[in-house]
Amino acid sequence: MSAVRSRSLAGLLGPFFFLFLLFWLVPLIGGLRLSLHSNTLVGEGVFVGLEHYRELMEDARYFKALRNTSFYAFLSLALILPVAVVFAHALQSLGGRLRSLLQFVLLIPGLTPPAVLALLFLLVFHGRQGLLNQWFVIPLGGQPINWLKDPDVILMALIMQCAWRWLGFMTFFIHSGMQAIPGMYYEALEVETHKAWHRFRWVTLPCLRHVILFCLMYLVVDAFALFSGAYVLLGGSGGTADAGLMLVSYTYQRALAFGEFGSAAAMSVSVAPCLLGILGCVVWISRRWAFKSGGHKA
């Protein structure tokens, strides 16, 4: 019976892992090989070893892009996840039809193609006549903000676009996790306390740990892969003083604008250890959280 089950699992999972390795491992090996050769896509090129990586360590724009991307990822997480938890908790208290309608509305931005969403946000951020200035900043007595030209707010504009796109999706994931929590957990806690905060702290939050971990990883990977939104809003550049320069945008510039394919490949490969390190920290924090929660309950 176990042999039949093993063959069934292999038949079901085999195509997935084959395609995963084909479309992940092959491009990775090709990018690594390209990063060790001269800046060309034609022929073999000249082997230059780690020269492109050494150049990155002396490239101020690369570190600027890395700082911008890290800051963008951190603020996106800090903004989206807490609000998504609040929204999910609010959805949990609504009736069935109204809840379904709001869930659909919240999912619409995430289902919109990034390029289309960025074009819509041009209307929001575009100079004095932008919707954000006309509907909020000026009516509240503030001075119009040039969201796409002022280096102090360019990155915030990208973060607001990210929040608009993914807040609904994260709310949907977290709300689905809340619905999966067994009611007996809350009933057992009611023996000790009836406070809503205690219900959330000792039941809801620990049970949502894996969902929140998934949302964290999803948003971090999306932040380091950001391209379409920044490209449409900033015209393929990093904006004024490179305030909105992201890693993928800079890689695109080096490869297609300057023809430095080897340098661009080295930049792409160099991001992998950074991203793996961040995701590793997230998993470590999640495990520590689970350990403390389990220890407290024990």
Image (cartoon, rainbow, N blue to C red):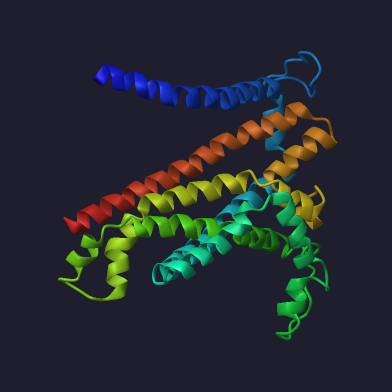
Q: In this view, does 165 lie above or below 30?
A: below
Most extreme residue toward the front is: 97
Point out residue 55 in the picture as x, y percentages from the top left corner. 72, 32
Q: Can residue 62 be seen in this view?
A: no
> Which quadrant of the figure contains the C terminus?
bottom left
Relative placement, left or right, of 167 versus 40 is: left
Q: Can residue 34 be seen in this view?
A: yes
The picture quadrant where one finds residue 181 is bottom left
Closer to the camera in the image, 79 or 58 = 79
Relative placement, left or right, of 294 versus 241 is: left
Q: Count of labels shown?
A: 0
Residue shown at the point (25%, 62%) measured from the top left:
183
Residue shown at the point (33%, 47%) measured from the top left:
287
Point out residue 25 in the picture as x, y percentages from the top left corner. 57, 24
Q: Is residue 74 above or below residue 275?
A: below
The picture quadrant where one finds residue 221 is top right
Point out residue 147 in the picture as x, y percentages from the top left corner. 76, 66
Point out residue 2 in the picture as x, y percentages from the top left corner. 25, 20
Residue shown at the point (76%, 82%) measured from the top left:
138
Relative placement, left or right, of 220 versus 45 is: left
> Which quadrant of the figure contains the N terminus?
top left
Closer to the camera in the image, 168 or 297 = 168
Q: Is residue 268 above or below residue 94?
A: above
